[in-house]
Protein backbone atom coordinates (compact mmCIF):
# COMPACT_ATOMS: atom_id res chain seq x y z
CA UNK A 1 0.00 0.00 0.00
CA UNK A 2 1.40 3.37 -0.94
CA UNK A 3 2.14 6.19 1.49
CA UNK A 4 -0.61 8.22 -0.24
CA UNK A 5 -3.21 5.59 0.53
CA UNK A 6 -1.99 5.20 4.12
CA UNK A 7 -2.52 8.81 5.15
CA UNK A 8 -5.79 9.75 6.80
CA UNK A 9 -8.49 11.24 4.55
CA UNK A 10 -9.32 14.89 4.81
CA UNK A 11 -11.99 15.58 7.42
CA UNK A 12 -14.16 18.61 7.92
CA UNK A 13 -15.38 20.14 11.13
CA UNK A 14 -19.03 20.14 10.20
CA UNK A 15 -20.70 16.73 9.99
CA UNK A 16 -22.12 15.87 6.60
CA UNK A 17 -24.48 13.15 7.77
CA UNK A 18 -27.28 15.44 8.91
CA UNK A 19 -29.63 12.47 9.23
CA UNK A 20 -27.63 11.24 12.26
CA UNK A 21 -27.72 13.02 15.60
CA UNK A 22 -25.30 12.69 18.53
CA UNK A 23 -26.01 10.01 21.09
CA UNK A 24 -28.48 11.38 23.60
CA UNK A 25 -30.69 9.95 26.26
CA UNK A 26 -33.59 8.32 24.50
CA UNK A 27 -36.89 10.08 24.80
CA UNK A 28 -40.28 9.10 23.56
CA UNK A 29 -41.18 10.99 20.39
CA UNK A 30 -44.62 11.77 19.08
CA UNK A 31 -44.98 10.31 15.58
CA UNK A 32 -46.08 13.04 13.21
CA UNK A 33 -49.29 12.11 11.38
CA UNK A 34 -49.67 11.74 7.63
CA UNK A 35 -52.72 14.00 7.68
CA UNK A 36 -52.96 17.68 8.69
CA UNK A 37 -52.95 18.34 12.43
CA UNK A 38 -53.51 21.93 13.60
CA UNK A 39 -51.20 21.45 16.59
CA UNK A 40 -48.23 19.67 15.02
CA UNK A 41 -48.35 21.00 11.46
CA UNK A 42 -48.86 24.19 9.50
CA UNK A 43 -50.37 22.81 6.28
CA UNK A 44 -50.60 26.09 4.40
CA UNK A 45 -50.47 29.85 4.49
CA UNK A 46 -53.90 31.30 3.58
CA UNK A 47 -53.88 33.86 0.80
CA UNK A 48 -56.25 36.80 1.18
CA UNK A 49 -57.14 39.12 -1.67
CA UNK A 50 -55.61 42.52 -1.05
CA UNK A 51 -54.27 45.20 -3.37
CA UNK A 52 -50.91 44.03 -4.73
CA UNK A 53 -48.59 44.40 -7.69
CA UNK A 54 -49.56 42.34 -10.72
CA UNK A 55 -46.30 40.39 -10.83
CA UNK A 56 -46.75 39.36 -7.18
CA UNK A 57 -50.32 38.27 -7.90
CA UNK A 58 -49.13 36.07 -10.78
CA UNK A 59 -46.39 34.56 -8.61
CA UNK A 60 -48.81 33.92 -5.75
CA UNK A 61 -51.12 32.18 -8.18
CA UNK A 62 -48.33 29.64 -8.71
CA UNK A 63 -47.53 30.53 -12.32
CA UNK A 64 -43.89 31.62 -12.02
CA UNK A 65 -41.52 33.92 -10.15
CA UNK A 66 -42.08 37.69 -10.01
CA UNK A 67 -39.17 38.28 -12.37
CA UNK A 68 -40.68 35.89 -14.93
CA UNK A 69 -44.11 37.45 -14.35
CA UNK A 70 -42.70 40.81 -15.47
CA UNK A 71 -41.74 39.19 -18.77
CA UNK A 72 -45.25 37.74 -19.21
CA UNK A 73 -46.71 41.19 -18.58
CA UNK A 74 -44.32 42.91 -20.99
CA UNK A 75 -45.19 40.35 -23.68
CA UNK A 76 -48.89 41.13 -23.37
CA UNK A 77 -49.90 37.71 -22.04
CA UNK A 78 -51.77 39.02 -18.98
CA UNK A 79 -55.12 40.79 -18.82
CA UNK A 80 -57.02 42.55 -16.05
CA UNK A 81 -60.79 42.69 -16.42
CA UNK A 82 -60.48 41.76 -20.10
CA UNK A 83 -57.85 44.36 -21.01
CA UNK A 84 -54.24 43.47 -21.82
CA UNK A 85 -51.80 45.07 -19.38
CA UNK A 86 -48.17 45.72 -20.32
CA UNK A 87 -47.26 48.29 -17.67
CA UNK A 88 -44.96 46.89 -14.99
CA UNK A 89 -45.98 47.87 -11.48
CA UNK A 90 -49.71 47.74 -12.25
CA UNK A 91 -51.75 47.13 -9.08
CA UNK A 92 -54.45 44.47 -8.81
CA UNK A 93 -57.51 45.22 -6.69
CA UNK A 94 -59.41 42.50 -4.77
CA UNK A 95 -62.33 42.71 -7.21
CA UNK A 96 -60.20 42.50 -10.37
CA UNK A 97 -60.25 39.44 -12.64
CA UNK A 98 -56.74 38.51 -13.82
CA UNK A 99 -56.26 36.16 -16.74
CA UNK A 100 -53.15 34.57 -18.26
CA UNK A 101 -53.45 33.15 -21.77
CA UNK A 102 -57.22 33.39 -21.37
CA UNK A 103 -57.30 31.43 -18.11
CA UNK A 104 -58.52 33.09 -14.92
CA UNK A 105 -55.95 33.15 -12.12
CA UNK A 106 -56.83 32.71 -8.48
CA UNK A 107 -54.84 32.86 -5.26
CA UNK A 108 -54.62 29.38 -3.81
CA UNK A 109 -53.57 28.75 -0.22
CA UNK A 110 -49.85 28.12 -0.20
CA UNK A 111 -48.88 24.59 0.74
CA UNK A 112 -45.41 23.32 1.70
CA UNK A 113 -44.63 19.70 2.46
CA UNK A 114 -41.64 17.40 2.70
CA UNK A 115 -41.46 13.82 1.41
CA UNK A 116 -38.91 11.16 2.27
CA UNK A 117 -38.77 9.75 -1.26
CA UNK A 118 -38.36 5.97 -1.68
CA UNK A 119 -36.70 4.21 -4.62
CA UNK A 120 -38.46 3.42 -7.90
CA UNK A 121 -40.53 6.61 -8.08
CA UNK A 122 -40.13 9.15 -10.90
CA UNK A 123 -39.97 12.83 -9.91
CA UNK A 124 -42.58 14.13 -12.32
CA UNK A 125 -46.25 15.08 -12.27
CA UNK A 126 -47.07 12.71 -15.13
CA UNK A 127 -45.21 9.82 -16.74
CA UNK A 128 -46.19 8.70 -20.29
CA UNK A 129 -44.81 5.23 -19.54
CA UNK A 130 -47.15 4.86 -16.56
CA UNK A 131 -44.32 4.34 -14.09
CA UNK A 132 -44.90 5.22 -10.45
CA UNK A 133 -44.44 8.92 -9.70
CA UNK A 134 -43.87 10.86 -6.50
CA UNK A 135 -47.30 12.44 -6.96
CA UNK A 136 -48.85 9.12 -5.90
CA UNK A 137 -47.21 9.55 -2.50
CA UNK A 138 -48.63 13.04 -1.81
CA UNK A 139 -52.10 12.73 -3.33
CA UNK A 140 -53.84 12.54 0.06
CA UNK A 141 -52.78 15.89 1.49
CA UNK A 142 -56.33 17.25 1.54
CA UNK A 143 -55.06 20.56 0.14
CA UNK A 144 -54.46 22.24 -3.21
CA UNK A 145 -52.27 20.40 -5.71
CA UNK A 146 -48.54 20.66 -5.07
CA UNK A 147 -45.49 20.17 -7.31
CA UNK A 148 -41.97 18.84 -6.63
CA UNK A 149 -39.20 21.41 -6.25
CA UNK A 150 -36.42 20.15 -8.49
CA UNK A 151 -36.01 16.43 -8.98
CA UNK A 152 -34.41 13.28 -7.64
CA UNK A 153 -33.47 10.40 -9.94
CA UNK A 154 -35.66 7.32 -9.91
CA UNK A 155 -33.40 5.37 -7.57
CA UNK A 156 -32.25 8.31 -5.44
CA UNK A 157 -34.00 8.50 -2.09
CA UNK A 158 -34.47 11.17 0.54
CA UNK A 159 -35.57 14.77 1.00
CA UNK A 160 -37.94 16.14 -1.66
CA UNK A 161 -39.83 19.39 -1.19
CA UNK A 162 -43.33 20.02 -2.64
CA UNK A 163 -45.24 23.29 -2.90
CA UNK A 164 -47.70 25.28 -4.99
CA UNK A 165 -45.75 28.47 -4.29
CA UNK A 166 -44.56 29.20 -7.82
CA UNK A 167 -42.19 32.01 -6.92
CA UNK A 168 -40.47 30.05 -4.16
CA UNK A 169 -40.16 27.01 -6.43
CA UNK A 170 -38.57 28.95 -9.28
CA UNK A 171 -36.19 30.80 -6.98
CA UNK A 172 -35.00 27.65 -5.19
CA UNK A 173 -34.18 25.76 -8.39
CA UNK A 174 -32.46 28.74 -10.02
CA UNK A 175 -28.63 28.29 -10.05
CA UNK A 176 -28.13 31.66 -8.37
CA UNK A 177 -29.99 30.44 -5.27
CA UNK A 178 -26.97 28.29 -4.37
CA UNK A 179 -29.18 25.96 -2.32
CA UNK A 180 -27.34 23.60 0.00
CA UNK A 181 -27.82 19.88 -0.73
CA UNK A 182 -26.23 17.07 1.29
CA UNK A 183 -26.15 13.45 0.17
CA UNK A 184 -25.10 10.12 1.62
CA UNK A 185 -23.55 7.85 -1.03
CA UNK A 186 -22.52 4.20 -1.02
CA UNK A 187 -19.81 3.40 -3.57
CA UNK A 188 -18.77 0.11 -5.16
CA UNK A 189 -15.31 0.34 -3.55
CA UNK A 190 -13.43 2.26 -0.87
CA UNK A 191 -12.75 5.92 -1.62
CA UNK A 192 -9.00 6.59 -1.44
CA UNK A 193 -7.67 9.88 0.02
CA UNK A 194 -6.29 11.09 -3.32
CA UNK A 195 -9.70 10.88 -4.97
CA UNK A 196 -11.42 12.43 -1.96
CA UNK A 197 -9.14 15.44 -2.30
CA UNK A 198 -9.69 15.52 -6.07
CA UNK A 199 -13.47 15.79 -5.61
CA UNK A 200 -12.95 18.88 -3.46
CA UNK A 201 -10.37 20.38 -5.83
CA UNK A 202 -12.60 19.68 -8.84
CA UNK A 203 -13.04 17.32 -11.77
CA UNK A 204 -13.58 18.26 -15.40
CA UNK A 205 -16.77 16.77 -16.87
CA UNK A 206 -18.27 17.06 -20.33
CA UNK A 207 -20.34 20.07 -19.23
CA UNK A 208 -17.56 21.82 -17.34
CA UNK A 209 -15.63 21.68 -14.10
CA UNK A 210 -17.39 20.61 -10.92
CA UNK A 211 -16.29 20.18 -7.32
CA UNK A 212 -17.85 19.14 -4.03
CA UNK A 213 -18.29 21.88 -1.43
CA UNK A 214 -17.40 19.43 1.32
CA UNK A 215 -16.88 15.68 1.46
CA UNK A 216 -15.98 13.19 4.20
CA UNK A 217 -16.15 9.53 5.07
CA UNK A 218 -19.28 8.72 7.07
CA UNK A 219 -17.81 5.52 8.49
CA UNK A 220 -14.03 5.06 8.70
CA UNK A 221 -14.57 1.30 9.00
CA UNK A 222 -16.40 1.31 5.67
CA UNK A 223 -14.75 3.76 3.30
CA UNK A 224 -17.39 3.12 0.65
CA UNK A 225 -19.84 5.32 2.61
CA UNK A 226 -19.36 9.00 1.82
CA UNK A 227 -21.11 12.22 2.78
CA UNK A 228 -21.00 14.92 0.14
CA UNK A 229 -22.32 18.49 0.09
CA UNK A 230 -22.96 20.15 -3.23
CA UNK A 231 -24.88 23.16 -4.52
CA UNK A 232 -25.07 22.31 -8.22
CA UNK A 233 -28.34 21.12 -9.71
CA UNK A 234 -26.80 19.54 -12.82
CA UNK A 235 -28.27 16.25 -13.98
CA UNK A 236 -26.80 13.19 -12.17
CA UNK A 237 -23.89 15.34 -11.06
CA UNK A 238 -22.80 13.16 -8.10
CA UNK A 239 -22.95 9.97 -10.16
CA UNK A 240 -20.91 11.59 -12.92
CA UNK A 241 -18.28 13.01 -10.56
CA UNK A 242 -17.60 9.62 -9.01
CA UNK A 243 -17.76 7.82 -12.36
CA UNK A 244 -15.11 10.22 -13.66
CA UNK A 245 -12.74 8.86 -11.00
CA UNK A 246 -13.63 5.21 -11.59
CA UNK A 247 -16.30 4.68 -8.94
CA UNK A 248 -19.92 3.59 -9.24
CA UNK A 249 -22.58 4.98 -6.90
CA UNK A 250 -24.64 2.05 -5.65
CA UNK A 251 -26.99 4.04 -3.41
CA UNK A 252 -27.65 7.76 -3.11
CA UNK A 253 -29.77 9.37 -0.40
CA UNK A 254 -30.41 13.10 -0.03
CA UNK A 255 -30.34 13.86 3.68
CA UNK A 256 -30.65 17.66 3.50
CA UNK A 257 -32.12 20.24 1.12
CA UNK A 258 -32.27 23.97 1.87
CA UNK A 259 -32.01 23.34 5.60
CA UNK A 260 -34.70 20.62 5.60
CA UNK A 261 -33.88 17.08 6.74
CA UNK A 262 -35.89 13.86 6.98
CA UNK A 263 -35.38 13.19 10.67
CA UNK A 264 -38.24 11.10 12.14
CA UNK A 265 -39.82 10.75 8.69
CA UNK A 266 -40.16 7.18 7.44
CA UNK A 267 -39.40 6.35 3.82
CA UNK A 268 -42.48 7.11 1.70
CA UNK A 269 -44.05 9.39 4.36
CA UNK A 270 -44.54 13.14 4.17
CA UNK A 271 -45.26 16.01 6.53
CA UNK A 272 -46.22 19.68 6.31
CA UNK A 273 -43.55 22.28 7.04
CA UNK A 274 -43.92 24.43 10.12
CA UNK A 275 -43.89 28.24 10.12
CA UNK A 276 -40.20 28.49 11.02
CA UNK A 277 -39.20 26.18 8.16
CA UNK A 278 -41.34 28.15 5.70
CA UNK A 279 -39.80 31.45 6.78
CA UNK A 280 -36.33 29.96 6.38
CA UNK A 281 -37.16 28.72 2.86
CA UNK A 282 -38.46 32.13 1.84
CA UNK A 283 -35.27 33.73 3.17
CA UNK A 284 -33.14 31.29 1.17
CA UNK A 285 -35.24 31.99 -1.92
CA UNK A 286 -34.89 35.74 -1.25
CA UNK A 287 -38.63 36.34 -1.41
CA UNK A 288 -39.85 39.64 -0.03
CA UNK A 289 -43.03 39.69 2.01
Image (cartoon, rainbow, N blue to C red):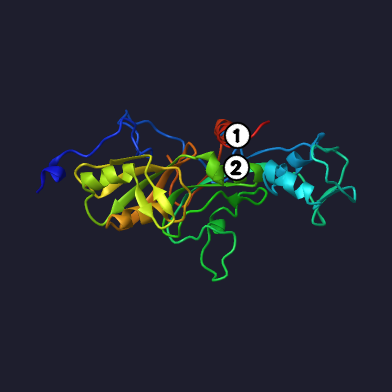
- Residue at 34 percent across and 55 percent down: it is 251
The answer to whether marks 1 and 2 mark residues whose Cβ atoms lie closer than 8 Å is: yes
Q: To which residue does mark 1 refer?
A: 286
Q: Nearer the viewer, residue 61 or 6?
A: 6
Could you tell me residue 94's position as x and y percent? 85, 38
Query: Label 1: few (<14), some or many (≥20) within 10 Å?
Result: some
Kindly tell me whether residue 139 is visible in this rendering: yes
Question: In the rendered image, which quarter is residue 22 located in?
Answer: top left
Residue at the top extreme, as displayed:
25
Question: In the rendered image, which quarter is residue 213 located in?
Answer: top left
Q: To which residue does mark 2 refer?
A: 171
> Is the C terminus in the top left, top right, bottom left or bottom right quadrant?
top right
Tell me the distance, in whole angstroms, between the alpha carbons under discs 1 and 2: 8 Å
Could you tell me residue 159's position as x and y percent? 46, 46
Q: Nearer the viewer, residue 248 or 26?
A: 248
What SS does tag 2 mark?
helix
- Residue at 73 percent across and 47 percent down: it is 71
Q: Nearer the viewer, residue 266 or 107?
A: 107
Could you tell me residue 53's position as x and y percent? 78, 37
Could you tell me residue 45's position as x and y percent? 67, 37
Residue 66 left/right relative to 178: right
Q: Nearer the viewer, residue 138 or 225?
A: 225
Amino acid sequence: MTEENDRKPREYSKSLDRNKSPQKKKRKRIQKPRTPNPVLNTPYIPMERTTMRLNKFIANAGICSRREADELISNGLVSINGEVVKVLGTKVEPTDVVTYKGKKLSLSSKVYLLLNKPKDYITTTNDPENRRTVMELVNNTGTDRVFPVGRLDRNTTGVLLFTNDGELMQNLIHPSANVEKVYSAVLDKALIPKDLDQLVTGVTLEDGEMHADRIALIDHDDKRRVGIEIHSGRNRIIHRMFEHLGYKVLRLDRVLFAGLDKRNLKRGDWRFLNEKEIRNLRNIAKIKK
